[in-house]
Image (cartoon, rainbow, N blue to C red):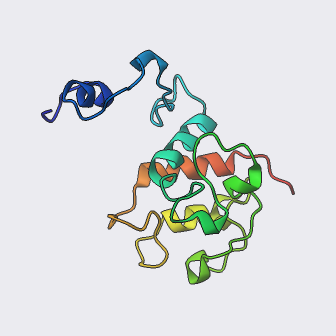
Amino acid sequence: MRLGDSINQLAKWLSLGRVINMPELKNVPQLPIWTDENRFSLEQRARAYLDVNCGHCHIKGGDAYNTGLFLDYDVKIPSHLGIDKAPVSAGGGAGGLDFDVVPGDAKHSILLYRMNSVEPGTAMPELARSIIHKEGVDLIRQWIDNMPSKK
């Protein structure tokens, strides 16, 4: 595939023999497109972004399983999404903040704090990242700030 090609990655891998026994594409679930404000809600887009960028570790069985923060798209339990959940393993990476996600208050949410850092031990995701993804941080900030506050 060349830069600029537009083909479904699964279809391409299937054609190359890199995947086998795949169901028909129409039966493969798809996440919302995190940049598509016209077709998907802020909640859907933020959750899809977190799944793709964080869910590989923050999932049952993943490297961040011990945190109790699960960011795969299908999670329904608010505390598993970090809502009003105290961190269990962030240490100094929590920036002195008390909860992973504070509804209506992104600036006091550890999730956003860690996404908005490049400092080793604080920055999330921690691998292969030397810059802040400003569009992603802005999306998650909007999502948290738009949650109903409990105040």
- Seen as rendered, the residue at the extreme bottom is 92
Instruction: Give percent across and percent down for residue 64.
Output: 55, 65
Q: Quadrant of residue 127?
A: bottom left
Give the tally of numbered discs. Answer: 0
Measured along the vertical axis of the image, is residue 4 above or below residue 132? above
Instruction: Give percent across and percent down for residue 80.
Output: 70, 55
Measured along the vertical axis of the image, is residue 149 above or below residue 126? above
Residue shown at the point (60%, 55%) measured from the top left: 60
Q: Is residue 66 left or right of residue 119?
A: right
Residue shown at the point (85%, 54%) measured from the top left: 150
- Seen as rendered, the residue at the extreme left is 2
- Seen as rendered, the residue at the extreme front is 21
Position of the N terminus by quadrant: top left
Q: Quadrant of residue 111?
A: bottom right
Q: Nearer the viewer, residue 114 or 69?
A: 69
Measured along the vertical axis of the image, is residue 67 above or below residue 73? below
Instruction: Give percent across and percent down for residue 141.
Output: 58, 53
Q: Quadrant of residue 47?
A: top right
Q: Is residue 58 left or right of residue 106?
A: left
Position of the C terminus by quadrant: bottom right
Q: Nearer the viewer, residue 63 or 86?
A: 63
Residue shown at the point (56%, 50%) measured from the top left: 140
Instruction: Give percent across and percent down for residue 124.
Output: 47, 65
Residue shown at the point (57%, 61%) measured from the top left: 112
